[in-house]
Amino acid sequence: MSKTQKAIIRFEKRFASNVTKGFGSFMKSVGNFFVGVFKVLDSKLTIMIVPHSQDKVLNFQTNVFALVMGCLVFVGVCSSFFYFNRRSISASMEISSLMDQNRQTLASLDELRDENANLFQAAKRFQTSLSQSLALLGINQANDKSNASVSNSDLSSLFNSSELSQGSSKEVADIRKLTSYLEDSVEPIEQIGKMLKTQQNLFTEIPSINPVKNPNVHISMAFGPNVHPLTGQWYIHKGMDFSTWSSGDPVMATASGQVVNVGYDNSFGNSIIIKHNHGIYTRYAHLNSIRVKKGHFVEQGQIIGTIGNTGISTGPHLHYEVHIGSDVVDPAKYINITK
């Protein structure tokens, strides 16, 4: 064996010996520490309670360990008390907040019930108006409905509490019935829309609008017996005079048709005659200007001229006539005019 190998073996033995001694010393120190702690904790203590009176003195014997554990238990109990007391206060505040929210919810629910009642009243009026309109148009709302469907669409069933679904509030059940009624009303309303669409051409062929669109327009002379403004004699006024107290305001065709006459004469001044379907003619007289020519086709509402003071006239106005065949009729029968 060489010198180097012998040196390594001696080093390893010394190292192992030192580690063993060090570990033994560490364990001995740890043991001595715990022994010292045990001795301290096992130290005897005497607690004396001496009353101010002549009563017997009370002695309590204990050790440090019991005293420390007692203090820890006391601190733990106090900490638990404050913790749970704080939790209790927080829970009380949360309960109070929930109670306030509950009161607000109840108030909102009462308001919702009031609005629900108003909705039912409006729905009843809607039902009455719709039924009357359908009757006038000859549409039977219940033709294609079964008895069950008709019962559901009748708003009177909204107030029949015996038909409420189990587990549902009255308001929810009423809204469901109202929804069912409105769904059943869609079809007749669509029928009314189709009918109005088919009659749209008829409405535009009848002189049904005001010939002057101006907020200042008024009727200066109505149809029928009137005193002539120039002669002062009674005569039959065969038209309606519209005035805006000025010239130049636009005049519109009251129905769709063809212009059959454009000209001037001493009585009517500048005038236009339009032929409409169903034997109806309209005349627009005393115009300041004319914007159509004979033979033109015009649409209802199209501007054909402006108000003027031509012909026999005492001031700017439109003289408007409606003829059916050879008869002159009151234009107010065809348009909604407030005198």
Image: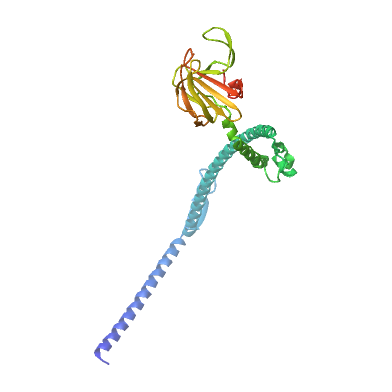
Residue 311 image offset from top left, x and y in percent: 48, 15
Residue 250 image offset from top left, x and y in percent: 46, 24
Q: Quadrant of the N terminus?
A: bottom left
In this view of the protein, which residue sits in the foreground, 50 or 18?
Answer: 18
Q: How is the image coloured?
A: rainbow
On the question of residue 54 being in view, the answer is no
Q: Is residue 13 above or below residue 306?
A: below
Label tally:
0
Residue 180 image offset from top left, x and y in percent: 66, 42
In this view of the protein, which residue sits in the foreground, 263 or 136?
Answer: 263
On the question of residue 99 being in view, the answer is yes
Horizontally, residue 24 falls left or right of residue 242, namely left
Q: Quadrant of residue 203?
A: top right
Q: Quadrant of the C terminus?
A: top right
Q: Is residue 71 above or below residue 237?
A: below
Q: Residue at x 29, y 83 (%)?
A: 11
Residue 159 image offset from top left, x and y in percent: 71, 37
